[in-house]
Amino acid sequence: MVQSERSSNEGKLTSKAERLQNAFMFFLTQVLRSKKIKIDKGICLKVVKEQIAFHKTLYRLPRKDLLDLVPEAQGIRKDKEKAQNIYTYLIKRNEKDVIQILLQYCSQLTTEETASLLEDAKSSPLFKLKIFLYQLQGDFQKCLTLFFQIKAIKADVFAWLSEIQLMLKGQEIITTTVVDA
């Protein structure tokens, strides 16, 4: 259905097709998160790329529309406080799932695939995903720079540094701090 919508609308999706595509992407994300079910690496990469694209769209929404997406919470009285929780509520939950998926397939990822994912993620609000991808490339300086540039994740830098230090001693490539923090 999504492909036929795209071909009949000059490459663009109707809102109905976009909702269907997003629902399927989030379904696959939940399935992949279980770790009991393995899916082809190509499908995994497609899901990750769709998640990145979804969050880019989410990031470009007008502030008022974003505020409407975040449910009312006790203790949040000002729109400014509510807006500060958008990263936590709308993005952080899905970002953790995306990184968990990539953790399952990271040993199979080529340098080109990692670079392609990173290029897609650069203009997205998935900050920890960017750090994870830079880490896979071995660019720890860029990871550290991102931690200090982005207020939403700055507090996680010391846990990440501790794990990187241990990793470099043992020459392990993957960290879970980005996911757990």
Image (cartoon, rainbow, N blue to C red):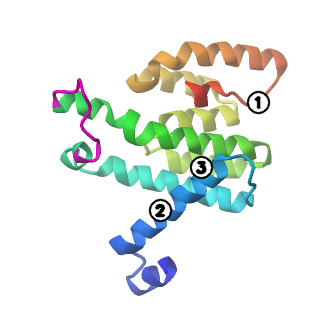
- The percent coordinates of residue 90 (x first, y second) are 39, 42
Q: Is residue 72 left or right of residue 13?
A: left
What residue occupies the far front of the structure in this picture?
74
Q: Amino acid at mark 1?
A: Ile
Classed neighbour count for the residue bearing mark 1: other residues with Cα under 10 Å, few (<14), some (14–19), many (≥20): some
Secondary structure of the residue carrying numbered label 2: helix
Classed neighbour count for the residue bearing mark 2: other residues with Cα under 10 Å, few (<14), some (14–19), many (≥20): few
What residue occupies the far bottom of the structure in this picture?
8
Q: CA distance from mark 3 to mark 1?
A: 18 Å
Secondary structure of the residue carrying numbered label 3: helix
Q: Quadrant of residue 10?
A: bottom left
Q: Which is in the foreground here, disc 3 or disc 2? A: 2
**Residue drawn where x is 46% and y is 36% of the image:** 92
Residue holding disc 2: 23
SS majority, magenta: loop
Q: Which residues are magenta?
A: 68-78
Q: CA distance from mark 3 to mark 2?
A: 21 Å
Label 3 or label 2, whichever comes before in sequence order: 2
Q: CA distance from mark 2 to mark 1?
A: 32 Å
**Residue drawn where x is 65% and y is 31% of the image:** 135
As for residue 14 lying within the magenta part, the answer is no
Residue holding disc 1: 173
Q: Is residue 94 left or right of residue 40?
A: left
- The percent coordinates of residue 174 (x first, y second) are 73, 31
Residue holding disc 3: 117
Classed neighbour count for the residue bearing mark 3: other residues with Cα under 10 Å, few (<14), some (14–19), many (≥20): some
